[in-house]
């Protein structure tokens, strides 16, 4: 069935897999990099700035993709990445190191991702059909998780000792993905004659006016941000805490060989566990939850997700960390398909692309709050972050409940009006 997919889809899955493998070697550990090279407070500010810039680029990238074409924006994003990774390589060479130039290059990476991701998502929808879409997203989700698993393992073991080589591999892969995008991706948007004024801020805001006026959707989006805040603790407070607090331990494997693990390595092991569970059980869990109440199962998933991350946040005991990641992985497997199904039901079909573009910002906002939590972590420690996780979980449940009730009420009112006419 994979060969029956549109060539753009197959190419994009390959591109996503390759780029995620190398980016997962480096970017999940950048909070540690900036904390060690500068300090935790400055690291938090830098990560917040990077996420905010990507947030704005994402909005504008989606708008431009509908105006001038998917491929042009995707190619632009890939070329910016090649330049940025070259700068990162220079600023982390054996002869010269500059965390500030590294940060500037990270800003460019954020801009390139913000520009190209909406275009890529729109292109996938353009060339897929309702019959192939479920399979397309399933195989892409599987490939992304597998690539993150591979990249996180490599990064966890070599980030501190071979950063230059990892960035070199990332640059080489970026050149390859740029070449594949240029020569194997075809344009899927019909050309438009676009007046100059349509590139400004006013038409951009007007294009999202309908979405912003949909209160139930906005509340549901805020709920998603609350849950993403929990997830992005992994690459921020939790990664920094484990790097600083986790005591190196010796693992003896069946008396055959032994090895030691520190905080960064244990983070890669836990990421591997999380990804393996998702890769192996996504299909089974998706079928299982379809027979249940989507809304109730989503809330169960939220709770398990939070409990697992709370253990992940508070414990330095390897066995407890393994258990915590198992719990959060089960929660993730439950809530993700439920939330996606509910989201598909509540968006306006006539403006689906705009709705999904705003929904995509859930991840950027979650990253932003996750990066800001480095401040809270410095002030309150793990207890304060655990409190934030609890607050985020309750907010996610309450906001989702209010949003869905309002949506049902508005649909009932519309039905009554139509019946009256």
Image: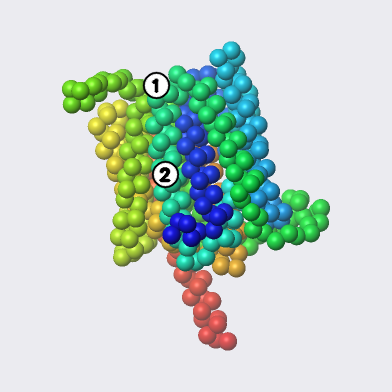
Residue at disc 2, secondary structure: helix
* Gap between marks 2 and 1 measured at Cα: 27 Å
Q: Residue 281, image x and y in percent? A: 31, 50
Q: Which residue is drawn at 37% across and 56% down?
A: 298
Q: Residue at left 51%, top 71%?
A: 410
Between 381 and 298, which is closer to the camera in this rendering? 298
Q: In which quarter of the image is the N terminus?
A: bottom left
Q: In which quarter of the image is the C terminus?
A: bottom right
Q: Which residue is drawn at 55% across and 14% down?
A: 94
Q: Residue 145 carries which label?
A: 2
Q: Give the residue pinned by disc 1.
A: 244
Q: Residue at x 40, y 42 (%)?
A: 146
Q: Position of residue 77 (x, y in %)?
A: 64, 42
Whole-percent x, y for residue 301 in the image:
34, 52
Instruction: Tell me if residue 156 comes above or below residue 114 in the rendering.
Output: above
Looking at the image, can residue 221 be seen?
yes
- Total tally of numbered discs in the picture: 2
Report if residue 303 is visible in the image.
Answer: no
Disc assigned to residue 70 = none
Image position, residue 202 (x, y; %): 74, 54
Q: Hey, which residue is sitting farthest top in the picture?
A: 95
- In the displayed structure image, the side of residue 107 where residue 274 appears, left or right: left
């Amino acid at each position: 069935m994979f060969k029956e997919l549109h060539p753009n889809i197959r190419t994009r899955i390959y591109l996503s897999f390759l780029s995620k493998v190398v980016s997962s070697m480096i970017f999940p550990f950048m909070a540690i990099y900036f904390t060690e090279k500068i300090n935790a407070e400055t690291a938090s500010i830098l990560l917040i700035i990077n996420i905010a810039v990507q947030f704005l680029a994402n909005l504008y990238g989606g708008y431009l993709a509908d105006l001038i074409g998917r491929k042009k924006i995707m190619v632009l994003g890939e070329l910016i990445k090649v330049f940025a990774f070259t700068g990162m390589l220079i600023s982390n060479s054996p002869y010269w190191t500059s965390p500030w130039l590294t940060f500037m290059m990270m800003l460019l990476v954020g801009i390139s991702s913000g520009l190209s991701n909406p275009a890529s998502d729109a292109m996938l929808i353009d060339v897929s059909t309702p019959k192939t879409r479920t399979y397309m997203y399933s195989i892409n989700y599987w490939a992304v998780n597998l690539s993150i698993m591979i990249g996180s393992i490599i990064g966890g073991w070599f980030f501190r000792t071979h950063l230059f080589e990892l960035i070199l591999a990332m640059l080489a892969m970026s050149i390859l993905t740029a070449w594949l995008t240029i020569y194997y991706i075809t344009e899927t948007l019909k050309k438009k004659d676009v007046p100059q004024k349509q590139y400004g801020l006013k038409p951009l805001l007007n294009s999202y006016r309908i979405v912003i006026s949909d209160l139930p959707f906005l509340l549901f989006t805020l709920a998603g941000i609350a849950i993403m805040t929990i997830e992005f603790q992994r690459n921020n407070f939790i990664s920094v805490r484990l790097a600083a607090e986790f005591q190196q331990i010796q693992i003896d494997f069946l008396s055959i060989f032994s090895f030691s693990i520190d905080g960064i390595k244990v983070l890669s092991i836990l990421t591997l566990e999380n990804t393996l569970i998702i890769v192996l059980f996504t299909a089974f869990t998706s079928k299982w939850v379809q027979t249940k109440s989507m809304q109730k199962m989503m809330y169960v998933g939220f709770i398990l997700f939070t409990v697992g991350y709370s253990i992940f946040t508070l414990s330095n005991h390897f066995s407890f960390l393994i258990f915590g990641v198992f719990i959060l992985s089960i929660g993730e497997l439950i809530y993700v398909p439920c939330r996606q199904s509910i989201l598909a039901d509540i968006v306006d079909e006539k403006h689906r692309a705009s709705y999904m573009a705003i929904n995509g910002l859930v991840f950027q906002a979650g990253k932003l709050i996750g990066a800001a939590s480095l401040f809270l972590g410095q002030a309150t420690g793990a207890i304060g972050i655990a409190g934030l996780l609890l607050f985020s979980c309750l907010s996610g449940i309450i906001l989702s409940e209010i949003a869905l009730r309002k949506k049902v009420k508005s649909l009932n009112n519309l039905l009554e009006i139509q019946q009256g006419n």
